[in-house]
Image: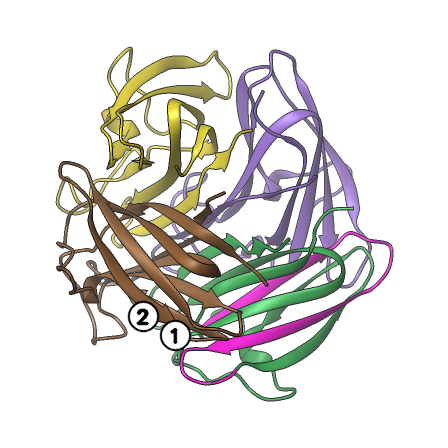
Chain colours: A purple, B yellow, C green, D brown
Amino acid sequence: MTGKHTWAIPEGYIPAESTGPEPEMESHETVCILNTNDEEATVEITVYFADRGPIGPFEKTVPAERTRHFRFNEFEDPEKIPKGEDFASVIESDLPVVCQRTRLDSRQAENALLTTIAHPGE
Amino acid sequence: MTGKHTWAIPEGYIPAESTGPEPEMESHETVCILNTNDEEATVEITVYFADRGPIGPFEKTVPAERTRHFRFNEFEDPEKIPKGEDFASVIESDLPVVCQRTRLDSRQAENALLTTIAHPGE
Amino acid sequence: MTGKHTWAIPEGYIPAESTGPEPEMESHETVCILNTNDEEATVEITVYFADRGPIGPFEKTVPAERTRHFRFNEFEDPEKIPKGEDFASVIESDLPVVCQRTRLDSRQAENALLTTIAHPGE
Amino acid sequence: MTGKHTWAIPEGYIPAESTGPEPEMESHETVCILNTNDEEATVEITVYFADRGPIGPFEKTVPAERTRHFRFNEFEDPEKIPKGEDFASVIESDLPVVCQRTRLDSRQAENALLTTIAHPGE
């Protein structure tokens, strides 16, 4: 079994504009979750801001032996995450999973990419 | 001896298009494995998807005191990894190794790069 | 409680030039700090250079359940961090936090991004 | 005291071409080392390849409370590292340090950046 129950990502930002064909080239901020267990994992994502209280949890499921790449810009329930504002996120899972985040920024003509494995909690 | 026996990479994606001279500028998704041991390491890579079961293992070897940078877009046995589809991977090695992944995305005129050390398992 | 009391970032560099509208597209070097505790965290950042002694500490606060994304190019007290010079940083917090750093480099026409979770101390 | 005695970086590559003014925009592959100790650290870097034995060690020093950002493309003693060839590196230090690697790739008109904290050894 590979993974941890808690992950933190201090940096989040959904660029307000995009260049290029959607959805591949739409600016997006993604959390990628890998569940290697033989049972579905239930994941709760809480989003933190600079100047107001956290929102969420956003509930997601990752089936057994599957990966799901969730785009923060598509989160809707319980509310949307505003574009152009700094945020951070904490991912809590009932089963051990592995989390990584990636951003495609296509605000300028050529896209830019960044990624990092999230910080595993205890 | 440096390394771990298990590594996980939640995010994988082989862009469907490229710009620029191949093979240097072909869009690719790479896992780089370093084997500092004085014996050859046998590595098994399993690839996970969003909506179907995992494929593999893809068997690779890394000779003693060597590094090998494997491109997911060149995997063929037991099958190819489709382009333009989200995936994740788990690397299991009989000897402790260190894994890192890198992507060169040349879909637009200027290339973009990302990298991260993989998540080490227990 | 998620996080550590000490974090290190060996690479820092504030590009001397920018292209594009400020402040979004101004070249910047950011440390993002997430405080999931229910109390305010007091953070001290020390900046190291190649050829002279460290400066700081720069004192910052991150309120309870908030994230703050600090730009090194806006640090002023006790002194400014010079542009175009290699630096490193150590972040010490009285409460456990999680740190990540990101750079937007807009020296050339298209921006480039990089990020990594900082290295957690003991 | 922050850091470890051993670090591994599985991915290395010095692009063969550059675009833009040197040395800032010359394609480079950097290892950034932070020494927060109050004594000079002596560092030995060994470079691994795909199809031949490792070279080195390249000996470097990082003074007390300093950071040094070493460019692999400037290594000369005991030999140069070839451009356009995959490599990996292991950093061993007599004092605990923190290592991060960064690449600026300016082969195409717009530069691309990547970075990651190295993998800490035991």
Residue on which the image places disc 1:
C19
Looking at the rendering, which quadrant does residue C71 occupy? bottom right
In the image shown, does B59 or A68 lie closer to the viewer? Answer: B59
Q: Seen in the image, is B72 located left or right of residue B54?
A: left
Where does residue C13 sit, x and y in percent of width and height? 43, 72
Q: Is residue D40 above or below residue B87?
A: below
Q: Main secondary structure of the magenta part?
A: strand
State the extent of the magenta-drawn residues as a range. C26-53
Measuring 13% from the left and 59% from the top, which residue is drawn there? D79
- Element at label 1: loop
Assess whether mark 2 and mark 1 are in contact (beta carbons under 8 angstroms): yes
Q: Is residue A88 above or below residue B23?
A: below
Q: Residues within 10 Å of mark 2 (few under 14, many from 20)?
A: some
Query: What distance separates the C-alpha of mark 1 from that of mark 2?
Result: 7 Å
Check chain identity for marks 1 and 2: say if they share one: yes
- Looking at the image, the residue that sits furthest to the right is C38
- Looking at the image, the residue that sits furthest to the bottom is C79
Q: Quadrant of the N terminus of chain D?
A: bottom right
Residue on which the image places disc 2:
C108
Q: Amino acid at mark 1?
A: Thr
Looking at the rendering, which quadrant does residue C107 occupy? bottom left
Measuring 80% from the left and 55% from the top, which residue is drawn there? C65
Q: Identify the chain of the residue marked 1, using the numbered disc in the image.
A: C
